Amino acid sequence: MNKMSKKFPGKMNKISKNNFITYLLVLVLYIVIQVLLATGNVSSLMEGLLVPLCIYVMLAVSLNLTVGILGELSLGHAGFMCVGAFSGAFFSKCINGAMPDALRFIIALLIGALMAGIFGILIGIPVLRLKGDYLAIVTLAFGEIIKNLVNVMYIGRDGNGFHFSMKDFLSLNMEADGEVIVNGAQGITGTPHDANFTIGVVLIFLSLVIVLNLIHSRAGRAIMSIRDNRIAAESIGINITKYKLMAFSISAAIAGVAGVLYAHNLSTLTALPKNFGYNMSIMILVFVVLGGIGNIRGSIISAIVLTLLPELLRGLSDYRMLIYAIVLIVMMLFNWSPKANEWKEQVKEKYFSRRVSKGKGVK
């Protein structure tokens, strides 16, 4: 037991308990879905949503680090996902067959995280020094710029190396045996299909470990102090820009990893408005807001519910969107109503006091 746990045993126990519940939630859902898959009780359409479900959970958790923990609004999270997706897919397409599949995929994940994190730093350095909603404006523009750049980018490879153009693939001037890797609006075709549900859940666990440990670390407390009162944090010597960049770049890197997983779940990767546009960023933000800003477990639950609900209600075609809207309203009220929050706190206190009275609490 470290010094902090000796000094604040109840607090440390509460943090550990909350983290354990979050990990357990993901593990139980994974086991339940695996059992349903083994017994054949999952439709092919639902099975096809499992990897996207993992992607949305990672995106929601990573965006909550920026919106909930850092307190800054980002509207271009899909742009970081796009950077990770195309950088990881480009590497896999170039290296396919030259190394073991598992190693290639791991390196693609690292490249996607690195590239998205670098773009997060490049955007954050000039913007995070400012106050107000500048980050939201810049990230919104960044997402649209990245999507449009990818759609006019042509990259090919032949015996002489790589060729680049922003006109068309004919202007690459490759040899006859050359291969077009990035074909403008047609994207990247033939990315190895390495993604599956188990890998997605493993990446969710890694994302949670990174985010939750950051939140409860010294750096995380500094980040939250900046969110709560920037002037007070600055007055006690906290480097505002440093900690903001740390949170924002880690958030972008996790989004890049989600993008790599997304790219390796498709036969053709294209930069369309529906997958990397403004609407995708807004949908991820909806997951964060409905789950509770700053509530990592709530982001996981909202991403799962709002992703699977339309498919689960497919049989109720006439009432599906009505039920979906009602669920959105109920989730919003449950997470943001003062009485609901008061009731949840009372339930936690009763549960914890009951454990203590039975001798199961911290001694």
Image (spheres, grey):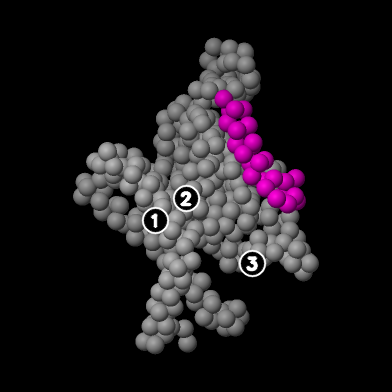
What SS does tag 2 mark? helix
What SS does tag 3 mark? helix
The image shows residue 176 at horizontal and vertical percentages of 54, 12
What SS does tag 1 mark? helix
- Which residue corresponds to mark 3? 221
Left or right placement of residue 113 versus residue 357 in this view: right
| Kind of residue at badge 1 | Val
Residue at image coords 46%, 71%:
342
Q: Nearer the viewer, residue 363 or 347?
A: 347
Asked whether residue 178 is drawn in magenta, I would say no
| Kind of residue at badge 3 | Arg
Q: Nearer the viewer, residue 78 or 178?
A: 78
Whether label 1 touches label 3, CB < 8 Å: no
Q: Which-is-in-front pick, marks 2 and 3?
A: 2
Alpha-carbon neighbours of circle 1 within 10 Å: few (<14), some, or many (≥20)? few
Q: What residue span does the magenta drawing correspond to?
A: 125-151
Figure quadrant of residue 141: top right
- Which residue corresponds to mark 2? 287
| Kind of residue at badge 2 | Phe
Q: Nearer the viewer, residue 333 or 228?
A: 333
Q: Mark 1 or 2 closer to N-term?
A: 2
If the image is split into quadrants, where does the N terminus sit?
A: bottom right
Left or right placement of residue 126 versus residue 214 in this view: right
Residue at image coords 59%, 27%:
148
Q: Which-is-in-front pick, marks 1 and 2?
A: 1
Q: How many marks?
A: 3
Q: Nearer the viewer, residue 123 or 336?
A: 336
- Which residue corresponds to mark 1? 330
